């Protein structure tokens, strides 16, 4: 049976030390009981701060990604071939802003 999407909002005790992004995100995902994916080039050479204390998975991830060019999208419970899967976080690079656009950027963009 999969982990309910409500787990994303369950308060957990995180103890993730700072380090290379890939290592830090794997430790965060293990402690949050979620899956994640990211493009290697988005994480290459990036160092993330750690996160310690009681919070939900999203708050912990926001802390880890603060000050970086990364954001995330979360997909709740999903199934593959009838097998339930835990919530899945896709971590990706924030796109650059279009200086000619009059519409607000979705998702938020980074100034060029």
Image: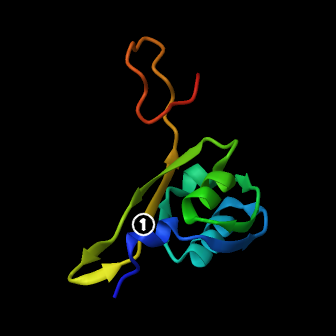
The residue that mark 1 highlights is 88
**Residue drawn where x is 42% and y is 58% of the image:** 74
Q: Position of residue 45 (x, y in %)?
A: 70, 53
**Residue drawn where x is 52% and y is 39% of the image:** 94
Q: Quarter of the image for the N terminus: give it.
A: bottom left
At label 1, counting other C-alpha atoms closer than 10 Å, the crowd grade (few under 14, some 14-19, many 20 or more) is many
Between 79 and 14, the residue placed more toward the observer is: 14
Q: Residue furthest left?
A: 81
Q: Position of residue 11 (x, y in %)?
A: 59, 70
Q: Position of residue 15 (x, y in %)?
A: 74, 73
Q: Secondary structure at mark 1?
A: strand
Q: On the image, which quarter does residue 86 sit in?
A: bottom left
**Residue drawn where x is 68% and y is 55% of the image:** 64
Relative height, residue 14 to residue 97 (above, below):
below
Between 60 and 72, the residue placed more toward the observer is: 60
Between 22 and 83, the residue placed more toward the observer is: 83
Relative height, residue 89 to residue 108 (above, below):
below
Q: On the image, which quarter does residue 103 sit in?
A: top left
Left or right of 110, for residue 19: right
Left or right of 33, for residue 107: left
């Amino acid at each position: 049976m999969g982990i309910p999407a409500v787990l994303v909002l369950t308060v957990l005790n995180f103890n993730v030390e700072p380090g290379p992004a890939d290592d830090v995100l794997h430790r965060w995902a293990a402690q949050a009981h979620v899956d994640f994916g990211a493009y290697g080039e988005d994480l290459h050479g990036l160092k993330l701060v750690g996160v310690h204390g009681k919070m939900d998975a999203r708050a912990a991830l926001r802390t880890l990604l603060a000050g970086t060019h990364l954001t995330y999208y979360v997909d709740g419970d999903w199934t593959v071939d009838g097998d339930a899967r835990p919530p899945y976080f896709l971590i990706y690079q924030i796109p650059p802003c279009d200086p000619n656009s009059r519409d607000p950027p979705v998702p938020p963009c980074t100034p060029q």
